[in-house]
């Protein structure tokens, strides 16, 4: 049986971390996987999360099963975080906790396949490297719509809107809620409004993946588009993650949110998701959700977490600014100024796989072959060296 298997293919992001660890060069810099590092190059546990963890350890009395949808208090809190306190959608919404946002993507992919097997999922060109494999593993067709302009390094709005005008009722259009992965180029609020109009006109279903809420502008600002859309469309799918904004990467804490036309439709979607969960992993791991719930139910911890999140977001802005300045000084052009216009962790440099290979081979700088660098992986002291390397391979 196993003879039929083809040779293993390395994951384009996760394999970088392994290669980085094995690289003996002391000057090495890891700008691969999307993980936030502080100025000491560490990814510490957030203080609010640490305090919540102490509280959970002191008060938790059992490790018995939770339930197929995971922790309901977490589901409630995370839905409020994404859609806002004042949303009026409760009877048209359902949320289940999932093993990370990849788990949420797969859950919603499976739900789409069961609900409408001939669904085509439209992804931004380019999109998060794992979107296509997850949607295809769920048995769905995948198509790309125009998004990033390699020339301007910003969103090609005209091309995007013209592609989306071709999407119809059997299509699901996946949008990045904020901090586009991999490009860092976001759409602004007026574009969210225009896509909402188009969705109502063409009948396609919006699917928003919001994995970096709080890293772009602010917790509220980053959710403006998804919130606007949710108030206006009949059906919508949302995935969210606590990996980045709570720093819970390895705890695999995410959620799948479904908005339907009415309570019956939502109950059917929930029922189907629970059956799918049972047939896949039964229930999601609890620890991360218990921590998030504890932070969000305690005002002091919430305030501390918000402060830490804002510090990370502000530091990202300053890293972008410093890298831009350094590149301007070393290169003597404004060629790399676009880095400052990008949002969140990532920036697409516009380099070829061969140039990215040179960054790794000559300079021990690890980043994804598609040209993405993780700004959040930089430390202040790395910046002159990284700028020199970028200038050298450009
Ligand atoms: C990334 O894009 O680097 C992160 O979202 C990690 C992942 O799961 O791929």
Image (tube, rainbow, N blue to C red):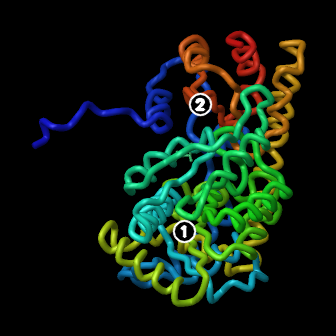
Q: Establish if 161 lies above or below 268.
A: above
Look at discs 1 and 2 and give the one toward the viewer: 1
Relative to residue 172, is residue 384 depicted above or below?
Answer: above
Spatial CA distance of label 1 from label 2 is 28 Å
Q: Residues within 10 Å of mark 2 (few under 14, many from 20)?
A: many
Residue 111 in percent (x, y) is at: 44, 68
Residue visible at 73% across and 32% down? 149
How busy is the neighbourhood of tag 1: few (under 14 within 10 Å), some, or many (20 plus)?
Answer: many
In the rendered view, does 196 fall on the left or right side of 321? left
Q: Taking the image as drawn, is residue 260 in sight?
A: yes
Position in image of residue 139 (x %, y %): 37, 55
The count of marks equals: 2
Q: Which residue is mark 1?
A: 255
Q: Quadrant of the N terminus?
A: top left
Q: Residue at x 67, y 51 (%)?
A: 164
Q: Which residue is mark 2?
A: 30
What is the x, y in percent for residue 339?
80, 32
Ligand 1 quadrant assignment: top right
| Quadrant of the rendered image containing residue 4 | top left
Q: Residue at x 37, y 52 (%)?
A: 137
Which secondary structure, mark 1? strand
Image-based side of 387 in relation to 124, left or right: right
Q: Is residue 69 left or right of residue 29?
A: left
Q: Work out which residue is located at the far left of the displayed protein and give it.
A: 1
Vertical position of residue 297 compared to residue 2: above or below: below
- Quadrant of the image containing the C terminus: top right
Q: Where does the image place residue 159, in percent across and percent down from the top left? A: 73, 40
Q: Secondary structure at mark 2?
A: strand
Q: Nearer the viewer, residue 66 or 42?
A: 66
User: In the displayed structure, would residue 5 be above or below residue 71?
Assistant: above
């Amino acid at each position: 049986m196993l003879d039929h298997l083809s040779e293993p293919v390395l994951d384009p992001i996760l394999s970088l971390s392994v290669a980085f660890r094995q690289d003996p060069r002391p000057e090495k810099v890891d700008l691969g996987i999307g993980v936030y590092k502080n100025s000491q190059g560490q990814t510490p546990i957030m203080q609010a999360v640490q305090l919540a963890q102490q509280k959970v350890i002191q008060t938790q009395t059992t490790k018995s099963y939770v339930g197929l949808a995971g922790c309901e208090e977490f589901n409630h809190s995370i839905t409020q975080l994404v859609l806002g306190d004042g949303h009026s959608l409760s009877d048209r919404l359902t949320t289940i906790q999932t093993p990370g946002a990849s788990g949420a993507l797969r859950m919603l992919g499976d739900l789409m396949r069961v609900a409408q097997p001939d669904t085509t999922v439209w992804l931004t060109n380019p999109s998060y490297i794992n979107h296509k494999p997850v949607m295809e593993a769920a048995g769905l067709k995948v198509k790309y719509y125009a998004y990033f302009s390699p020339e301007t390094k910003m969103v090609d709005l005209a091309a995007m809107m013209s592609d989306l005008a071709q999407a119809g009722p059997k299509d699901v259009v996946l949008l990045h809620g904020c901090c586009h992965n991999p490009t860092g180029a976001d759409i602004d609020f007026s574009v969210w409004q225009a896509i909402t109009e188009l969705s109502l006109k063409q009948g396609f279903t919006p699917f928003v993946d919001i994995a970096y809420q709080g890293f772009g502008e602010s917790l509220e600002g980053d959710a403006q588009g998804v919130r606007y859309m949710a108030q206006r469309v009949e059906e919508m799918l949302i995935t969210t993650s606590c990996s980045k904004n709570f720093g819970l990467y390895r705890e695999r804490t995410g959620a799948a949110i479904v908005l339907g036309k009415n309570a019956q439709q939502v109950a059917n979607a929930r029922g189907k998701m629970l059956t799918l969960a049972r047939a896949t992993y039964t229930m999601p791991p609890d620890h991360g959700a218990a921590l998030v719930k504890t932070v969000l139910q305690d005002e002091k911890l919430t305030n501390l977490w918000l402060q830490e999140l804002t510090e990370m977001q502000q530091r990202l802005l300053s890293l972008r600014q410093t890298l831009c300045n350094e590149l301007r000084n070393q290169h003597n052009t404004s060629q790399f100024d676009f880095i400052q216009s990008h949002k969140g962790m990532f920036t697409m440099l516009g380099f070829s796989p061969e140039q990215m290979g040179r960054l790794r081979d000559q300079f021990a700088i690890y980043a994804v072959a598609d040209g993405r660098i993780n700004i959040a992986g930089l430390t202040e002291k790395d910046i002159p060296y990284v700028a020199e390397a970028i200038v050298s391979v450009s």
